[in-house]
Image (cartoon, helix red, strand yellow):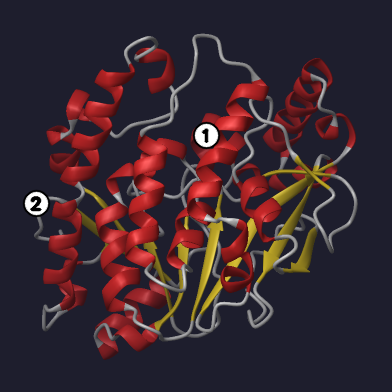
Amino acid sequence: MSGYESLTLRAGPAALARIRRDGLERGAIRAVAGAAGGPKWLILPHLDRFLFGEWLGDQPVDLVGASIGTWRFTAACDGRDPAAAITRLEEAYIEQRYSTGAGREEITSVTRSILDRVLPPESAAGVAAHPSRRLTAVTVRARGPGGSERRGIQALGSGLAGGANLVSRRALGLAYERVLFQHPEVAALRLAGEWIPTRRVALTADNVRDAVYASGSIPLHMAGARDPAGAPPGVYRDGGIVDYHIDQPLVDDGLVLMPHFADRLIPGWFDKFLPWRQRPRHATNTVLVGPSRRFLARLPQGRIPDRKDFLRYDGRDAERIRDWRACAAEGERLADEFRRWLADPDPARHLAPLLT
């Protein structure tokens, strides 16, 4: 329906109605959402550089991310040159390497070295209090066995959480509390009424590095962030557990832009395994910008990168890095077509429904 070769454009009902009525103006974008998904984000750096290095300028906007979405938006909050910071993240992410059978300590160490490239200590205060880009890092505080750093006990906690989620999203609250580390000027983000316990903590220079790390701290594979400053004591882990693809309304008025690596939204990480939970329900204000099937077919292996690539290419880092760079380069097509869409006098005609 979009009329573009590489781009898929979808919108929730409120977003679609607004664009039909008013067109698409930059000032209508009140929030940008960033999904969890690890290496899948590597088709998005070109689009991110356009959005945060050019188009959005200095207009106030909430950036709400989980996992790699938080890392992308942390780079976008660089006060000197956000496009260059996004490139640093892209390069550091592509170049990460692990030994065969790498354990939690090695993965944690490599991840923290990437964070040092994107968010050095001297930049923490600027990111936490950016004058126009208001970061929200979605994390979870683990409850019960999920808070243990002993692999067996933590695995038990994850298994119990997955079983509880099978019954109800609400039951995730037995194992995890959603904790939002938020820029001090963030308006109250509107979340779906799913009764998952939620706490809001002010983002500061003292906790921003722990918050960003925690938001992408994959259970079992990485150490959690313990006792971030200003937050309740505990172990904090990947926000994608509860908000995998940010299926949330987020704003009462205006649009939520979501540069995405898929054409659908999955609510939480455990829902990946539940086909009946893989349809968005709450993203009524969201405009999703994602890849088309034709775009995906052009990529190496005909797919976007994912975390399993570390096993597929085990011992062949040069090949993985080559293919990841090729995927990132293809992402320029998404940015180019998005520019064309912004210039279209009738952008609504290219939009398909997001909530069906």
Describe residue 21's horizontal placement relative to residue 298 as left or right: right
Residue placed at 34% from the left, 84% from the top? 18
Q: Nearer the viewer, residue 327 or 95?
A: 95
Q: Position of residue 341 (x, y in %)?
A: 15, 71
Residue placed at 80% from the left, 54% from the top? 228
Q: Which residue is mark 1?
A: 272
Image quadrant where one finds the N terminus: bottom left
Q: Is residue 218 above or below residue 253?
A: above
Please name the amino acid that badge 1 sits on.
Answer: Lys
Which is more N-terminal, label 2 or label 1?
2
Snapshot quadrant of residue 46: bottom left
Q: Position of residue 226 (x, y in %)?
A: 81, 44
| 10 Å crowding of disc 1: few (<14), some (14-19), many (20+) | few
Q: Is residue 105 above or below residue 85?
A: above
Image quadrant where one finds the C terminus: bottom left
Residue placed at 34% from the left, 79% from the top? 56
Q: Position of residue 87 (x, y in %)?
A: 33, 53
Please name the amino acid that badge 2 sits on.
Answer: Glu
Assign a secondary structure to mark 1.
helix
Residue placed at 68% from the left, 33% from the top? 166
Describe residue 143's horizontal placement relative to residue 312 as left or right: right
Does the CB distance between marks 1 and 2 fall below 8 Å? no
Q: Nearer the viewer, residue 240 or 168?
A: 240
Q: CA distance from mark 1 to mark 2?
A: 27 Å
Inspect this view and state whether residue 277 appears. Answer: yes
Inspect this view and state whether residue 242 appears. Answer: no
- Total marks shown come to 2
| 10 Å crowding of disc 2: few (<14), some (14-19), many (20+) | some
| Disc sitting over residue 353 in the figure | none
Q: Which residue is mark 2?
A: 5
Q: Position of residue 117 (x, y in %)?
A: 48, 49
